[in-house]
């Protein structure tokens, strides 16, 4: 394994080396000031109302916001306004325009409560929103138009695959997998401010439209019996990955508390509460992360910081997994693992693909796209219906810590994967593999990889090194537990990588890591990721209790 240590370290250096592009300027508290003379206000302030939900603003072009509430929405006996932003509450004796300043990048929510002369809370008229949620981006990218951004991403992907076939780059690609570059290059463009993953809507498109389409296309030729033949080791490694995250949180806090207590900050209680949201995300997903925020009453500012730690550390680990897929054979030999079931499944799918391959006509391509995006339409329709139905029972689900089951994205992945598996039993649809179903599925996967990479800002690593140190120790424990378990039961690295990413990355990126081994294996990642949603909140609660105990 020593001969692979240098390439791994070089990859990590690449992933973090652009961090000195930015410096931390500190955080400011939100300052709320009633304004009587707006004309005398200096600086560039954007006008917003509570109807500006989800609007995006660039902080390098915005000094603050002027929040205006239409008089028609105000109750008749209003005497003032209570404004709540994160942990801060401001009591104003005016309902007029309010200046909001001092925001940092993130998604802050400002809650508005009209009050009467006695300070009693009132309600806005006609169900007018009582809060405004914004998306604040640190700087304006060179290219904001998603048509241009998509072109850049496709050019980068084409460059990677073109250079991979050139003799001059064979030595480079011997150590660095092409899929890792498809993920890493967009993150450099994002870190340099050329494009912005925060501003772009391309990730939403690829994760909501192309991801379910690629799951359907990649499942069409899957050997379902072969998946079952993978045996219990896949599930065991998934559960071990969950255990590694549960244990990693308290171990990271204990290690920092013992050897570098200054990294914990002034309030250790806030630290473990904030880290509980990372545990929810790494075991389950965004819904589980939001649940932990509510359970432990994590402030918006701390929650925003933890999201950055979550995304950056998880994405660095994903980069290592993509590299590991390139050398999985060597790792399997070190683990003394039996990889025959995985290889049999991959070989069966590839043999079937070769047996039905033919030059596609226009009709063939449209039939393939109809199966893919007709399935996507059905999956969206079904996911919306199931999520809305379960939403009626949200209080009961929250009591059982199963609120993530009301997530439409969870059901989108479940239904799309199920449709693909059903299609694999239909000979007419299954034969669409012959006209390139899995190849188109792979194209969609690579576009998803590029948009995931575009969301990573490498410079964020250096904005709060203490928290990132804790996050890296945490991830290190997770990895250590996985490798020890894999060594003991001789599980192939494929199960290690997919079990880990099904927890840490979830349904959007687990199929990506699985497809790095072979596109035929992508459905395995999707199926395991679904389990993470079910275990996410339970595992995070146990992790939070352990972190509280050691803090």
Image (cartoon, rainbow, N blue to C red):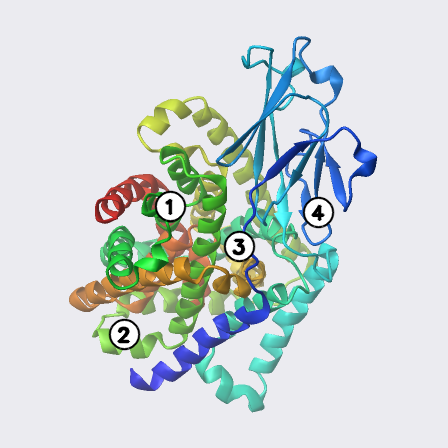
Q: CA distance from mark 3 to mark 2?
A: 28 Å
Camera-nearest residue between 516 and 285: 285
Question: Of helix, strand and loop, which one carries label 3?
Answer: helix
Q: Earlier in the sequence, mark 1 or mark 3?
A: 3
Q: CA distance from mark 2 to mark 1?
A: 27 Å
In the image, what residue occupies the spot 16% across and 66% down?
Answer: 488
Where is residue 459? Give x, y as percent: 54, 65
Q: Is residue 262 above or below residue 17?
A: above
Which residue, given by chain and number where applicable, does mark 2 sit on?
Answer: 332
Residue at the disc numbered 4: 63
Residues at marks 4 and 1, CA–CA distance in whole angstroms: 37 Å
Q: Which residue is mark 3?
A: 214
Relative side of 7 to 493, left or right:
right
C-alpha distance separating marks 3 and 4: 43 Å
Residue assigned mark 1: 284
Asked which secondary structure carries label 1, the reply is loop
Left-right relation of 272 to 40: left
Task: Determine crowd level at label 4: few under 14, some 14-19, many 20+ residues with C-alpha closer than 10 A.
Answer: some
Q: In which quadrant will I find the N terminus?
A: bottom left
- Circles 3 and 4, Cβ within 8 Å, touching? The answer is no
**Residue 287 at what x, y percent from top left?**
44, 39
């Amino acid at each position: 394994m020593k001969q692979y240590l240098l390439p791994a370290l070089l990859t990590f250096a690449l992933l973090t080396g652009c961090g000195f592009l930015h410096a931390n300027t500190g955080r400011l508290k939100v300052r709320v000031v009633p304004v009587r003379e707006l004309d005398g206000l200096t600086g560039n302030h954007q006008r917003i109302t509570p109807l500006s939900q989800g609007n995006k603003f660039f902080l390098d072009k915005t000094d603050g916001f002027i929040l205006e509430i239409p008089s028609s929405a105000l109750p008749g006996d209003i005497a003032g306004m209570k404004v709540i932003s994160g942990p801060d509450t401001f009591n104003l004796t005016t309902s007029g325009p309010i200046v909001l300043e001092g925001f940092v990048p993130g998604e802050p929510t400002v809650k508005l409560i009209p009050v009467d002369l006695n300070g009693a809370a009132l309600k806005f008229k006609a169900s007018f929103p009582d809060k405004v949620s914004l998306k604040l981006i640190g700087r304006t990218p060179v290219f904001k138009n998603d048509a241009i951004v998509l072109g850049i991403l496709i050019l980068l992907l084409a460059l990677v695959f073109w250079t991979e076939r050139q003799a001059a780059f064979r030595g480079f690609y011997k150590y660095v997998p092409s899929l890792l570059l498809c993920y890493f290059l967009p993150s450099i463009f994002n870190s340099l401010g050329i494009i912005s993953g925060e501003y772009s809507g391309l990730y939403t498109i690829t994760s909501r439209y192309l991801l379910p389409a690629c799951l359907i296309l990649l499942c069409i030729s899957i050997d379902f019996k072969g998946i079952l033949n993978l045996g219990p080791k896949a599930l065991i490694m998934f559960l071990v990955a969950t255990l590694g995250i549960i244990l990693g949180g308290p171990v990271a806090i204990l290690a920092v508390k013992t050897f570098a207590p200054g990294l914990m900050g002034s309030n250790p209680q806030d630290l473990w509460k904030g880290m509980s949201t990372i545990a929810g995300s790494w075991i389950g997903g965004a819904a589980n992360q939001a649940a932990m925020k509510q359970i432990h009453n994590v402030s918006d500012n701390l929650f925003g910081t933890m999201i950055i730690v979550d995304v950056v550390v998880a994405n660095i680990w994903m980069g290592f997994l993509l590299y590991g897929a390139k050398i999985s054979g060597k790792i399997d030999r070190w683990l003394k693992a039996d990889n025959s079931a995985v290889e049999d499944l991959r070989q069966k799918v590839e043999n079937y693909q070769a047996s039905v391959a033919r030059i596609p006509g226009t009709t063939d391509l449209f039939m393939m796209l109809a199966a893919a995006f007709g399935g996507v339409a059905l999956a969206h329709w079904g996911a919306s219906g199931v999520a809305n139905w379960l939403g009626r029972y949200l209080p009961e689900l929250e009591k059982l810590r199963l609120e993530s089951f009301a997530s439409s994205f969870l059901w989108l992945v479940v239904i799309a994967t199920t449709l693909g598996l059903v299609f694999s039993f239909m000979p007419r649809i299954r034969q669409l593999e012959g006209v390139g179903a899995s190849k188109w599925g792979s194209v969609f996967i690579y576009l998803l990889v590029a948009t995931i990479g575009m969301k990573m800002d490498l410079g964020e690593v250096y904005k709060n090194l203490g928290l990132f140190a804790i996050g890296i120790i945490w991830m290190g424990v997770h990895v250590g537990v996985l490798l020890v378990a894999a060594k003991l039961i001789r599980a192939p690295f494929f199960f290690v990588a997919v079990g880990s990413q099904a927890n840490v990355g979830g349904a959007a990126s687990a199929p990506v890591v699985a497809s790095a081994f072979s596109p035929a294996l992508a459905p395995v990642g999707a199926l395991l990721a679904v389990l993470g949603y079910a275990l996410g909140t339970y595992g995070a609660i146990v992790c939070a209790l352990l972190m509280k105990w050691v803090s």
